[in-house]
Amino acid sequence: MPPVQRWHDRLDALIAWSTALSVAQARTVTAAAVVVAGLADFATGDALWFGPIYLLIICVPAWTLGWREAALTSATCVAVSLAANGLEAYPLGRTAIAWNMAMRILAVTIIIVLMSGTRRSHDREWNRARSDPLTGLVNEQAFYDNATAAAKGQLWGILAYVDLDGFKQINDRLGHAAGDEALQAFASGVRDLIRSDDVFARIGGDEFLLFLPVDSEAEGYELATTLHLRMNCLQTTFALGCSIGALVLDLSETAIHKDHVGLADRLMYEAKNEGGAIWIRTASVPEDGGWTGPGAPLDHREVFGVLPAPSALH
């Protein structure tokens, strides 16, 4: 790997690390850095200049916490520097002191504006890269990250591959603008059905992914079936249904990955061949590490009225 690429990778890793810091972590890192720099400044007196070090420290809250906390940190750094060096660093009189202080304030202000503005741009582009502009749902890239986070500490989960029925006819008869409206209506309707910690993504065309944490395998079958029923009964201006392939995952044995999506996709095609059905299977991990999906397919027309609607949905 070329040296320039290595430096780029390290910079990307540093940006990812700093972006992932929580508010408490960012404040802790900033406070620790100020303390360490202040102690070193006190120990060396005016023999060494710590100005660039303080500027780097100010960059941390400017990136992670916003301009207000960055301004507070800069004031703290100035106070620490003055306490460590006094006014002996400015032997040319009051005019020199005023000029140097003004230049420091200007430099710090520029750093804070640049860093906080860059962070806002970074967040805006990051969100655009991870969301579907038509429906406002997350995209496939973000789905895996969000589903993995939602699965932490959970016992079981449902991974559902959803494909709309009747969407092509809407596009052909009414045009693409109507098709876009249908997708938006479906996405909005499903968002109203699921919980805030469930993950819902549009992965292209009329295909969607869902991840829903559950407490047991039985609840997984029940919730998937009930959700399919309600998704096919959404009150919209378009005649839309959906076919679903769903995997019930034992999260104590596995994390979520693309192989699961492939299995759910195949189940969805089986369900679509039956006409708006749902196929649900429990995925298990055999000893050789490969994935299988034992279990019988379920069509909601066979189980409706037998499985009660779970309280997770409203």
Image (tube, helix red, strand yellow):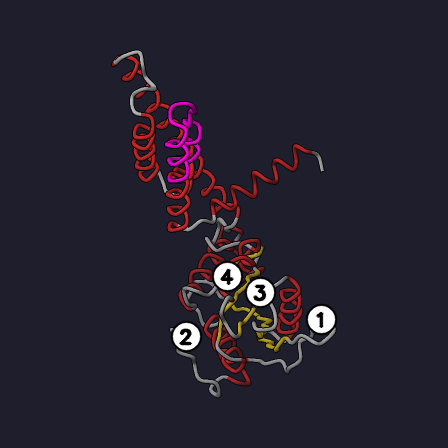
Residue type of the residue flagged with mark 3: Asp
Residue tagged 1: 289
Question: Label 4 crowding class (10 Å Cα cut-off): few <14, some 14-19, many 20+?
Answer: some
Dot 3 or dot 1: first in sequence order is: 3
At horizontal 33% and vertical 30% (from top left) the residue drawn is 84
Mark 2 vs mark 4, CA separation in Å: 19 Å
The residue furthest front is 43
Magenta residues (range): 35-57
Q: Nearer the viewer, residue 263 or 253?
A: 253
Q: Label for residue 312? A: 2
At horizontal 38% and vertical 23% (from top left) the residue drawn is 46
Dot 3 or dot 2: first in sequence order is: 3
At horizontal 63% and vertical 75% (from top left) the residue drawn is 283
Q: Does the magenta portion include 85?
A: no
Residue tagged 3: 163
Q: Circles 3 and 1: CB distance less than 8 Å?
A: no
Q: Label for residue 149? A: 4
Q: Nearer the viewer, residue 136 or 142?
A: 142
